[in-house]
Image: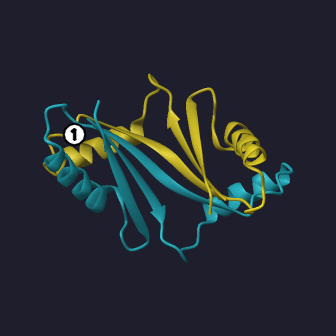
Chain colours: A cyan, B yellow
Amino acid sequence: MRAKVYVTLKRGVLDPQGKTVQRAVKSLGFKEVLEVRQGKYFELALPDDVAADRARQVVEEIARTVLTNTVIEDFRFELEEA
Amino acid sequence: MRAKVYVTLKRGVLDPQGKTVQRAVKSLGFKEVLEVRQGKYFELALPDDVAADRARQVVEEIARTVLTNTVIEDFRFELEEA
């Protein structure tokens, strides 16, 4: 089983990395891009015989305690059967 | 319109950042996690009146030329109506 975890900065938190990418994109002539925000992305591999409920519980706790700084970041995740 | 771009290391490319997260996860007692791979995640905001075809073309080119090191990374993206 695989879990995909997406970590994004909360709305209102400054994102200098995103701003830098945005400037790079603009300087290349892509005027369509209004804003860029950068986040993190994790893929976790779990054994195939883990129950979906348990997997959800484990991934939720890992995302909350290890992958996300919950003061400034939000996360969401999805599980995928292998 | 929003674009979500996911950048991941190609299979076979070492991921020391992911390995470090994996060790942290294991040391916290989550024995279910077999592997962690870390990637990048970008959200791009585009004007709502951009045609989907044009948006797809712009985002594909930005992802390929700015967001991804195509030697070691792959990308995929999806478009979302606002």
Of the 4 image quadrants, the one containing the C terminus of chain B is bottom right
Is B27 positioned to the left or the right of A34 in the image?
left
User: For mark 1, what is the residue?
Assistant: B33
The image position of residue B53, as x and y in percent, is 75, 43
Q: Is residue B5 left or right of residue B30?
A: right
Q: Is residue B35 left or right of residue B41?
A: left
| Number of numbered markers | 1
Q: Please give the name of the residue rendered at 63% of the width and 65% of the height, measured from the top-left corner.
A: A16
Q: Residue at x 70, y 39 (%)?
A: B60
Going 16% across and 52% down the picture, which residue do you hit? B28
Q: Can you say which quadrant of the picture contains the N terminus of chain B?
A: bottom right
Image-quadrant location for residue A64? bottom left
Q: Position of residue B4 (x, y in %)?
A: 57, 51
Q: Seen from this angle, which residue lies furthest bottom?
A: A12
Instruction: Give the crowd class for mark 1: few <14, some 14-19, many >=20 residues within 10 Å.
Output: many
Tell me residue A29's x, y (percent).
86, 51
Q: Secondary structure at mark 1?
A: loop
Position in image of residue B40 (x %, y %): 52, 47
Q: Is residue A34 above or below residue A71?
A: above
Judging depth in this view, the residue of B68 and B43 nearest the camera is B43
**Rendered image quadrant of residue B69:** top right
> Type of residue at label 1?
Val
Check the image and name the residue furthest to the top. B12
The subunit letter for the residue under badge 1 reads B
State the residue at coordinates (41%, 42%). B17
